Image (spheres, rainbow, N blue to C red):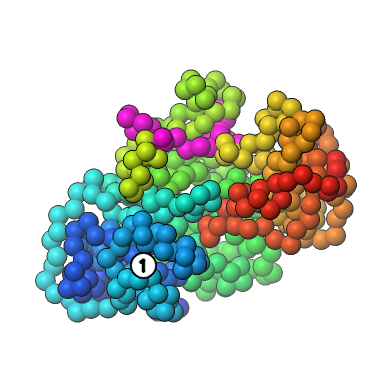
C-alpha cells in the first residue's frame, strides 16, 4: 500500500516498506535453508534495531514463531528460556553475536538473498510470538500469542488511539516487551507511519530524538516520562500523544504533561492480553486522572471477589479479561494455564481494581503485593502515589514487613531527589491517607530494582528488605 514510505528509522538511516518487505523475504529464505519450518521457534537477541523487525516478519512468512529474548539477562537466565522454548536458531542482533553464539544453538545474523514469494498459510489461531513474562516471581513463562491475538490488539489500539499514517512513533521501550512490540511498533506499521527505533531509553537521547525526528507519539512507563521531564530545554512541541502503562501513573505526572499541552493517555494491560485491556481516552485523561479507563472495544472485563462474585461499584476485586486478544496459554504448562484461564476464556490477571459507576477502572495493586495490617487491606500503589507527591521523593516502593501487633505493616523504600527527612515525609501523609495506610518505617536507598519494562521488582525488594526492621517509624 505504501512501498515508498519510510517504515523504520534507526541511527539516522531509513528503511522503506518495500525494503523491509524485500529484506524480510530474503531472510526468510535463508532461515528456510537453515531448516526453519512452520511452528519452529526463531529467537532474537539484541537491542531495538531494524534486524529485530526483519526477524519478526521473516519468521511470520515461514509460519514460524518469533521468540524475542531479553538481552539484559545472564546466560544462565537465557538458557532457562532456551531449554523451555527449544528454538531451532537464535538470530544475533548487532553487538550480540558473542552472547548469541554462547546459547548452545545455531546462531545467525540477519541477511539473505530474496527469492520467490513464500506463501505459507497462516491463520488467526496460529502461534505468532512466544513472549516470556519477566519472571519477577519464580521461573519465567512463555505466553503464547497468536496472529489473531496481535491482530485484534492492533484493532483495539487503533480504535482507542487516533493514530495517523503520517505519525512518527518513538520505540524506546524494549521490543522484547509486549507493549513496545504490540502497542508501538505493529500499530504504526499497519497505518503506514514511521517507527523510530532507539537501542534503549536514555532521557537525554530520547529528548534529542523527539526533537530531531519530530516524534508525534511515544509509549513509556511512568519512570521514563518522569525522567524526560527533568531534561532541560527539551523540545516536546511535536508530540501529540503520550501513552503510559506498566504501573499506576501518579496524577501529578499526568498533570505535568497536560500543562505542556501534551495529552497523556494511561492504559492497562498484560503480556497475556497482547497487551491492551483498559484505555483512558484523551478527553478523559485529565478529569479521570488516576484511572486506567474503560475496557478496549473487542474485550470484556469483569472485577470479581475471591469467590467469583462480580463486585459492586467501588468494591475492590480481581480483574478478569476475555476476548480475541487473550493468549492461548503458557508454553508447555497446561496446569499453570488452567489456573489462570478458564474454559470460557476468562483470564485471571492477579491485579486488583475498583470500578466506578461510569465504568472507569482504577488499578489498586497486584493481589500478591497487598499488605494486610490488623485486618485492613493496604494497597502499596495508593501509598506510593501519595509518597511521590512529597518534595524530595524521586522514587519509592512500599512493601510489608512483619509486626508483632498488626501482623505486618508498611515500609517505604525511598530514593531521594533532594535532602529530606523521613519524619517530614511521613508527616506529609497525615490527613491524606488513613492512619493505618501510612508506612510504619522509612528506609532510604540508592536505587530501586526494576524490570526492563520499568516495573518494580517487588519480590526482590521483599527478599532484601522484607524482614524485621528498626528503621525510622511513623
Q: Secondary structure at mark 1?
A: strand
- Residue 261 percent location from the top left of the image: 60, 54
Q: Residue at x 19, y 79 (%)?
A: 113
Quarter of the rendering containing residue 44: bottom left
Vertical relation: 426 (above or below) 373: below
Residue at position x 63%, y 36% in the image: 370
| Residue 446 % position (x, y) | 74, 62
User: Label 1: few (<14), some or many (≥20) within 10 Å?
Assistant: many
**Left or right, residue 445 beside residue 459:** right
If the image is split into quadrants, where does the C terminus sit? top right
Q: Judge whether residue 393 is colored magenta.
A: no
Q: Which residues are magenta?
A: 339-364
**Residue 366 image position (x, y, % from top left):** 57, 39
Name the residue beneath numbered marker 1. 44
Q: What x and y, as percent, mark residue 265?
A: 53, 48
Q: Residue at x 23, y 49 (%)?
A: 126
Q: Residue at x 56, y 33 (%)?
A: 353
Disc tally is 1
Q: Quadrant of the N terminus?
A: bottom left
Residue 125 figure quarter: top left
Note whether 313 is above or below 467 in the view shown.
Answer: above
Residue 2 makes an appearance in the image: no
In the displayed structure image, the side of residue 117 where residue 443 appears, left or right: right
Question: Which residue is at the front of the view, 61 or 445?
Answer: 445
Q: Measured along the vertical axis of the image, is residue 459 above or below residue 38?
A: above
Q: Quadrant of residue 367?
A: top right
**Is 400 located above or below residue 90 in the figure?**
above
Amino acid at each position: 500500500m505504501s512501498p515508498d514510505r519510510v517504515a523504520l528509522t534507526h541511527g539516522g538511516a531509513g528503511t522503506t516498506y518495500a525494503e523491509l518487505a524485500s529484506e524480510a523475504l530474503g531472510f526468510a529464505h535463508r532461515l528456510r535453508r537453515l531448516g526453519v519450518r512452520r511452528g519452529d521457534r526463531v529467537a532474537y537477541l539484541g537491542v531495538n534495531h531494524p534486524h529485530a523487525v526483519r526477524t519478526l516478519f521473516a519468521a511470520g512468512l515461514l509460519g514460524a514463531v518469533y521468540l524475542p529474548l531479553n538481552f539484559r539477562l545472564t546466560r544462565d537466565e537465557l538458557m532457562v528460556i532456551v531449554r523451555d522454548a527449544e528454538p531451532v536458531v537464535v538470530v544475533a542482533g548487532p553487538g550480540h553475536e558473542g552472547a548469541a553464539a554462547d546459547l548452545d544453538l545455531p546462531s545467525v545474523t540477519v541477511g539473505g538473498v530474496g527469492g520467490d514469494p513464500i506463501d505459507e498459510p497462516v491463520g488467526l489461531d496460529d502461534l505468532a510470538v512466544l513472549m516470556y513474562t519477566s519472571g519477577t516471581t519464580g521461573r519465567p513463562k512463555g505466553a503464547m500469542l497468536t496472529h489473531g491475538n496481535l491482530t485484534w490488539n492492533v484493532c483495539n489500539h487503533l480504535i482507542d488511539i487516533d493514530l495517523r499514517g503520517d505519525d512518527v512513533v518513538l520505540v524506546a521501550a524494549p521490543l522484547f516487551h509486549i507493549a513496545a512490540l504490540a502497542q508501538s511498533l505493529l500499530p504504526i506499521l499497519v497505518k503506514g507511519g514511521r517507527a523510530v527505533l532507539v537501542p534503549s531509553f536514555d532521557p537525554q537521547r530520547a529528548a534529542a530524538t523527539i526533537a530531531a525526528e519530530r516524534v508525534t507519539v511515544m509509549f513509556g512507563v511512568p519512570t521514563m516520562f518522569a525522567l524526560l521531564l527533568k531534561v532541560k530545554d527539551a523540545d516536546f512541541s511535536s508530540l501529540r500523544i503520550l501513552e503510559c502503562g506498566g504501573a499506576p501513573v501518579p496524577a501529578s505526572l499526568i498533570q505535568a504533561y497536560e500543562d505542556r499541552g501534551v495529552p497523556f493517555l494511561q492504559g492497562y494491560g498484560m503480556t497475556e492480553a497482547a497487551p491492551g485491556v483498559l484505555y483512558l481516552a484523551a478527553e478523559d485523561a485529565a478529569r479521570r486522572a488516576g484511572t486506567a479507563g474503560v475496557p478496549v472495544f473487542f474485550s470484556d472485563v469483569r472485577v470479581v471477589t475471591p469467590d467469583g462474585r462480580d463486585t459492586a461499584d467501588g468494591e475492590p476485586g480481581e480483574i478478569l479479561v476475555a476476548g480475541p486478544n487473550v493468549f492461548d496459554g503458557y508454553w508447555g504448562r497446561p496446569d499453570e494455564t488452567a489456573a489462570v484461564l478458564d474454559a470460557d476464556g476468562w483470564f485471571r490477571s492477579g491485579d486488583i481494581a475498583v470500578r466506578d459507576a461510569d465504568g472507569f477502572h482504577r488499578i489498586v495493586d497486584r493481589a500478591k503485593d497487598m499488605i494486610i495490617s490488623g485486618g485492613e487491606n493496604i494497597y502499596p500503589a495508593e501509598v506510593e502515589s501519595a509518597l511521590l507527591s512529597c518534595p524530595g521523593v524521586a522514587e519509592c516502593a512500599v512493601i510489608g514487613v512483619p509486626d508483632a501487633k498488626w501482623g505486618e505493616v508498611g515500609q517505604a523504600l525511598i530514593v531521594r531527589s533532594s535532602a529530606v527527612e523521613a519524619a517530614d515525609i511521613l508527616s506529609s501523609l497525615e490527613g491524606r491517607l488513613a492512619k493505618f495506610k501510612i508506612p510504619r518505617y522509612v528506609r532510604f536507598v540508592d536505587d530501586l530494582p526494576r524490570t526492563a519494562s520499568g516495573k518494580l521488582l517487588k519480590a526482590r525488594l521483599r527478599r532484601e528488605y522484607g524482614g524485621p526492621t528498626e528503621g525510622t517509624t511513623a
